Image (cartoon, rainbow, N blue to C red):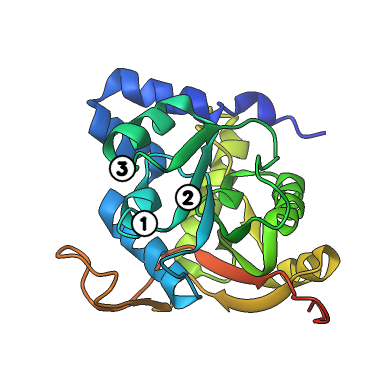
Amino acid sequence: MSTQFQYVQSYAAMVRAYLAAFPEDEAVARSVGGDFEHFGVLEHSILRQFGLKPTSSVIDVGCGSGRLTSQLTRYPKLSYLGLDVVPELLDYNRRKAARPDFKLELIAGNSIPAPDASADFVTYFSVFTHLLHEESYAYLEQTHRVLKPGGRVIFSFFEFAVEGLWGVFEGNVDWVRKRSFLGHINVFMHAADLRIWARRLGFKVIAFKRGDLPAIKVTEATATEKVQVGLHMLGQSFCVLEKPRPGEAAS
């Protein structure tokens, strides 16, 4: 059994520590690890690139402070359920990002509080990067249940093949060497292993995109003054899986 987990702080505790030390907007930015608008535009663009429609039903697991939430408010007929484990982030999302008809819920464990075959998209941006593989797999089991046939799940992940992420892994190694305190764990995955998961879970593989390649198409429909039209990199790799329609085979 690993001796390291005693040095891991819960994500909720880390967020509260930031909120106690910094102004709210800065604390939230530090908690979610990046620029609010920039990553919101990229996440929205990925969804559009892989089939988002103005009437889609979206479940955003790990919605946090509302980076994606805020971008999706432009679709009046879109259904949105945002889930997170940190009440302070959900409160921030409600006040600064979400629309009144959007649903935001606090969750625990690895379940998704939604009916079977009810969602067109389920997203996990910067979620599986901080979970045990078994937890991520359990979430994908739930995802298969809640997706409609033809529905898609999109998730980002740390990939060893992406040279720019090697520093994250070196940080993990330093944490082990020093037995130092860690805000949260950083977990790496291999695309080949995720293909095995997809087959076991009954998904079709639609796409794998490396985080160091400009694979995200920001269009006039998703661009903002700050994030221009063109091809962009996410930093983390991302995967798109689809729940097969009746008669289709998983891959």
- Whole-angstrom CA distance, mark 1 to mark 3, is 9 Å
Q: What residue is shown with label 3?
A: 97
- Whole-angstrom CA distance, mark 3 to mark 2, is 12 Å
Packing grade of label 2 (10 A; few <14, some 14-19, many >=20) is many
Q: Is residue 220 left or right of residue 164?
A: left
Look at label 3 and name its amino acid. Answer: Ala
Name the foreground residue: 98 vs 64: 98
Q: What residue is shown with label 2?
A: 80
Packing grade of label 3 (10 A; few <14, some 14-19, many >=20) is many
- Whole-angstrom CA distance, mark 2 to mark 1, is 8 Å
Q: Are marks 2 and 1 in contact (CB under 8 Å)?
A: yes
Q: Is residue 250 left or right of residue 16?
A: right
The structure residue drawn at horizontal position 43% and vertical position 58%, both measured from the top left corner, is 78
Packing grade of label 1 (10 A; few <14, some 14-19, many >=20) is many
Look at label 1 and name its amino acid. Answer: Leu
Is label 3 in a helix, a strand or a loop?
loop
Image: 171 above or below 109:
below
Q: Which is nearer the N-term, disc 1 or disc 3?
A: 1
Look at label 2 and name its amino acid. Answer: Tyr
The structure residue drawn at horizontal position 30% and vertical position 58%, both measured from the top left corner, is 74
Q: Which is nearer the N-term, disc 3 or disc 2?
A: 2
For the N terminus, the quadrant is: top right
Q: What residue is shown with label 1?
A: 72
Is label 2 in a helix, a strand or a loop?
strand
Image: 84 above or below 124:
above
Image: 232 above or below 174:
below
Name the foreground residue: 175 vs 86: 86
Q: Position of residue 230 (x, y in %)?
A: 27, 80
Residue 138 visible in the snapshot: yes
Residue 35 visible in the snapshot: no
Is label 1 in a helix, a strand or a loop?
helix
